[in-house]
Image: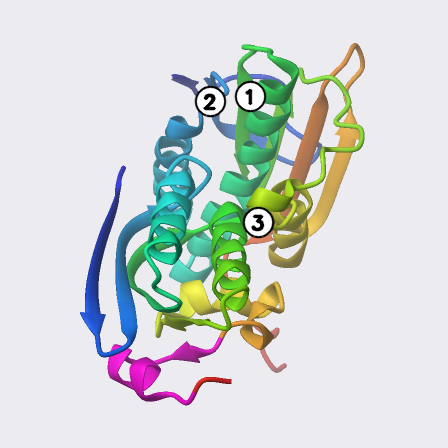
Amino acid sequence: MDADASGPPAPAGGAATVSLAFPPEPRLLGTVRLVVSIVARKAGMDEEAVEDLKVAVSEACAVAVGDLNRAGRPDLIELDVIETADRVGVEVRDRAPPAGNPDPPSAADAELNDRELGLALVGALVDDLRIAALEGGGNRISFWLRRGPEVPPPLT
Amino acid sequence: MDLDLNVHKEGDHSVLEVAGEIDVYTAPKLREKLIELVSEGSYHIVVDLEKVDFLDSTGLGVLVGGLKRVRNHDGTLQLVCTQEKILKIFRITGLTKVFPIHGTVAEAVAAPAE
């Protein structure tokens, strides 16, 4: 896993704080969560926001891992965590072909559709979730999280 | 990162204590354990999540799969969890309406079958 402070261009309005690139291996998601939680705590996020961020990042990366593995692609997944004054932004990029219609769960393993449930979970935890196709193939999942509870403006 | 699973019996119930992080990497281990319990004839299962540090959608899917398996045998699958960060995942996915969630193993074991 590579980590540096430069990385690809950040979404508008922020500067990339940390960039990671890692192969689509499920065992690495715990390491990704660890790095993201360290960055979030250093950015001053409260513990509830840190937990939300860990879940959202892990789910977004798990979608990328799943898409790449289904496609048999070993390409690196890129993750940017961007810190601004009041929010933390995340962008996950992969080079997987379009997901299309994933296979329904088999009868023997009648569970939920992890991809759809994962993205629904991300959507419930974050602000401004965007899922887009990348030029030349691949997907980008991006979102923002507030650093903590909204504080009402002081009375004047 | 690993997932520790321990099973003990409390009356008619099999109590599965889970410790660690449940995600796309570790969830298959939990799935296999639930399948094993049902195949051994344990149809009333309590999953104790008090020592779980992280739960993702794959873990939720595995628990839903376990619930379906025990229900095929008129069984029950109940959860024990008081951690707000884990309860939040069940709440926002609507699964608090699907799983009976208790504060202690004793409560879960004593709960009447629905």
The structure residue drawn at horizontal position 46% and vertical position 38%, both measured from the top left corner, is: B24
The structure residue drawn at horizontal position 35% and vertical position 32%, both measured from the top left corner, is: A31
Tell me the chain of label 2: A
Q: What's under tag 1, amino acid-wise? A: Glu
User: Magenta span has B103?
Assistant: yes
Q: What's under tag 2, amino acid-wise? A: Leu
Magenta segment: B100-112
In terms of sequence position, does the residue under pointer 1 or pointer 3 come before the other? 1
The structure residue drawn at horizontal position 64% and vertical position 45%, both measured from the top left corner, is: A107
Front one among A10 and A37: A37
Q: Position of residue A113 (x, y in %)?
A: 65, 45
Q: Position of residue B88 (x, y in %)?
A: 50, 67
Q: Give residue B10's mark.
A: none
In terms of sequence position, does the residue under pointer 2 or pointer 3 come before the other? 2
Q: Give residue A87's mark.
A: 3
Q: Which residue is mark 2?
A: A20
Dot 1: within a 10 Å radius of its alpha carbon, few (fewer than 14), some, or many (20 or more) residues? many
Q: Is residue B45 left or right of residue A154?
A: left
Up/down of A62 relative to B6, above or below? above
In terms of sequence position, does the residue under pointer 2 or pointer 1 come before the other? 2
Dot 3: within a 10 Å radius of its alpha carbon, few (fewer than 14), some, or many (20 or more) residues? some
Q: Position of residue A96 (x, y in %)?
A: 68, 18
Residue A82 found in image quarter: top right
User: Magenta span has A93?
Assistant: no
Tell me the chain of label 3: A
- Please count the marks in the image: 3
Q: What's under tag 3, amino acid-wise? A: Arg
Question: Are the two marked residues, 2 and 1, in contact with CB atoms closer than 8 angstroms?
Answer: yes
Q: Give residue A78's mark.
A: 1
**Quadrant in which the N terminus of chain A appears:** top left
The structure residue drawn at horizontal position 46% and vertical position 18%, both measured from the top left corner, is: A22
